Every structure is written in structure tokens, then in C-alpha cells.
Amino acid sequence: MTEERFIQIVEAYGANPARWPETERAAAMAFADAYPDVADAALQAEALLDDWLGRPDAQPSELLERRILNRFPAPVAAPVRWQIPAAAAAALLVGAFIGFASGALTVTEPLTPTLYAAADAYAGLDEDWITWLGDDV
């Protein structure tokens, strides 16, 4: 076991060897026996924290809460749904364009000359009937 791994175990699980992972407990205890100066420093620091956390009235401070919360990544904001309003605006613009453009395609001359021309085409209809029926009419 390395010094770095021993410190990681003590920081994660505390100073009490009963809380250490069973797979690494024997190696960590052997490391503590072989290097008492390194192990004692790490164990004493974590023992203070263990004692404080073991108190029934232990409440985390506001500073500790902020430090813990600051370690989490910032929440990702939901992506802005701009496609739907953009599609509606595009449809309105196309509709307005077609509406104004269709005004340019309509006939702006009055229809009266066309109606008179059609009436003139049938103007002689009465005379044709009269000639067909003969003078009896």
C-alpha cells in the first residue's frame, strides 16, 4: 500500500479501521504499523473530524455547506426553444408577403369596359331572332 492510498482511505472512511474497506484493511493497518509518523498525522486529523461528526448536536456550518455545494458542477440551463417562435414568425412573414404580392397580381382597371364589350357582343341577338322568326313578330 502506498502513502497516497492510505491517506485516501483515512480521508474517505475516517480514523476507525473498522470502517475501512475489508479488502484493504489489512494492508492499511500494516502500512500504519510500518510508517507510524505518516499514519499518526493522518489518523489524528481524521479522528478530530470523526469526533465532531459523532456528536449528536453536530450541525454543518454554512461555510461547509457552501464548500460542498461548490464542488458540484453548475446546473445546465435548459436549451432555449427558439425554433417554434421562429417558425411562427416566418409563417407570418410569408403570409404577409403573399398577401401584399397578390394585390399586385389583381386587375386594377375597372371592369365596366369588359362588361360593355361583352354586352356589345350580344347586342345583335334580338335582331337575329327577329330575322329568324320572320315578320310575324
Image (tube, grey):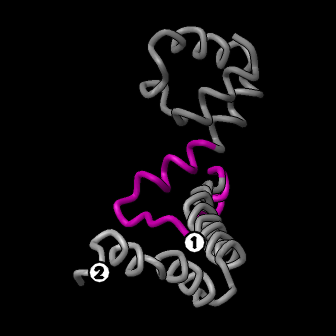
Q: Residue 17, relative to residue 126: is it above or below?
A: above
Helix, strand or loop under label 2: loop
Helix, strand or loop under label 1: helix
Indicate the quadrant containing the C terminus: top left, top right, bottom left or bottom right.
bottom left
Depth check: 43 or 137 in front?
137
Is residue 68 in view?
Answer: no
Q: Residue 16, relative to residue 33: is it above or below?
A: below
The amino acid type found where label 2 is placed reads: Asp
Q: Residue 118, relative to residue 18: is it above or below?
A: below
Say which residue appears at 63% left-offset and 90% top-offset: 110
- Between the C-alphas of marks 1 and 2, the distance is 119 Å
How many numbered marks are there? 2
Q: Residue furthest front?
A: 135
First in sequence, mark 1 or 2: give its number: 1
| Magenta span includes 71 | yes
- Residue wearing tag 1: 62
Query: In the image, which residues are magenta?
Result: 46-73
Position of residue 124 measured from the top left corner of the image (x, y, whole percent): 47, 79
